[in-house]
């Protein structure tokens, strides 16, 4: 009977200890008050941790092509000096025109030139591609003779560009590449868009 009492007492103590232990706690081999090692901490899952998101790639905007075709008003013309010709500034934010353009820089006087008239012209030719003067007769001896309506020794655009000009007329002319020097010729400006400043020195009416 004495042994039976001891057994009952031990069982009661064990049940009380079990009731005081937290539920689902895993047994530990660490002595009381000791902290777990880093490897033990890493083994325990962490709730609520978010993985860093990968950076979003962005593409820089591509540079657009040149804008619409330039107009005659977009081109700046200044006089280099008395009798020395003109300085032409070609804009680079628009493209070369594809049709012949003109702009009056100075009005002339007298009868307007017509088909068959012969015009004596001083001129300066600038290449669109590099803005450099390629030909110039201002300040030089001699002028270019152009007979309206006839095939010209220079470029085709003269006929259309000088229609209606008067003696003393100074005109800015933009000649597209298909109206300039023939692309199959050996001229250095073949296939080039041309910017011309022309001044009519004299007009000889058709006989």
Image (cartoon, grey):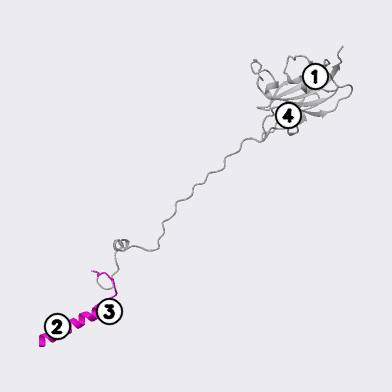
- Let me know if residue 56 appears in the view: yes
Residue ID at (20%, 82%) = 13
Q: Is disc 4 placed on a helix, strand or loop?
A: strand
Q: Disc 4 designates what residue?
A: 88
Q: Disc 1 designates what residue?
A: 121
Q: How far apart are marks 4 and 1 (CA)?
A: 18 Å
Instruction: Identify which residue, 59 or 141, lies in the foreground.
Output: 59
Give the magenta part as a residue range: 1-28
Instruction: Identify which residue, 149 or 146, lies in the foreground.
Output: 149
Q: Distance between the residues labelled 3 and 4?
A: 100 Å
Residue ID at (26%, 73%) = 32
Q: Is disc 2 placed on a helix, strand or loop?
A: helix
Q: Residue 7 carries which label?
A: 2
Against 127, is 14 above or below?
A: below
Majority secondary structure in the magenta region: helix
Q: Disc 3 designates what residue?
A: 20
Residue 100 image point, x, y percent: 73, 26
């Amino acid at each position: 009977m004495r042994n039976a009492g001891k057994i009952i007492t031990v069982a009661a103590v064990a049940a009380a200890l079990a009731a005081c232990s937290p539920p689902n706690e895993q047994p530990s081999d660490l002595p009381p008050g000791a902290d777990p090692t880093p490897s033990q901490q890493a083994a325990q899952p962490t709730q609520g941790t978010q993985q860093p998101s990968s950076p979003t790639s962005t593409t820089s905007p591509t540079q657009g092509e040149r804008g619409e075709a330039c107009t005659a008003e977009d081109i700046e013309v200044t006089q280099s000096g008395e009798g020395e010709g003109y300085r032409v500034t070609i804009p680079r934010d628009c493209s070369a025109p594809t049709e012949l353009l003109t702009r009056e820089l100075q009005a002339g006087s007298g009868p307007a030139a017509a088909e068959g008239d012969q015009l004596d012209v001083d001129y300066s030719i600038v290449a669109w591609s590099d803005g450099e003067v390629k030909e110039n007769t201002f300040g030089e001896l001699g002028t270019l003779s152009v007979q309206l309506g006839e095939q010209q020794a220079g470029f085709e655009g003269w006929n259309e560009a000088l229609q209606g000009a008067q003696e003393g007329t100074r005109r800015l002319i933009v000649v597209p590449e298909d109206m300039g020097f023939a692309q199959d010729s050996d001229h250095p400006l073949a296939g080039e868009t041309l910017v011309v400043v022309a001044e009519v020195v004299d007009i000889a009416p058709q006989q």
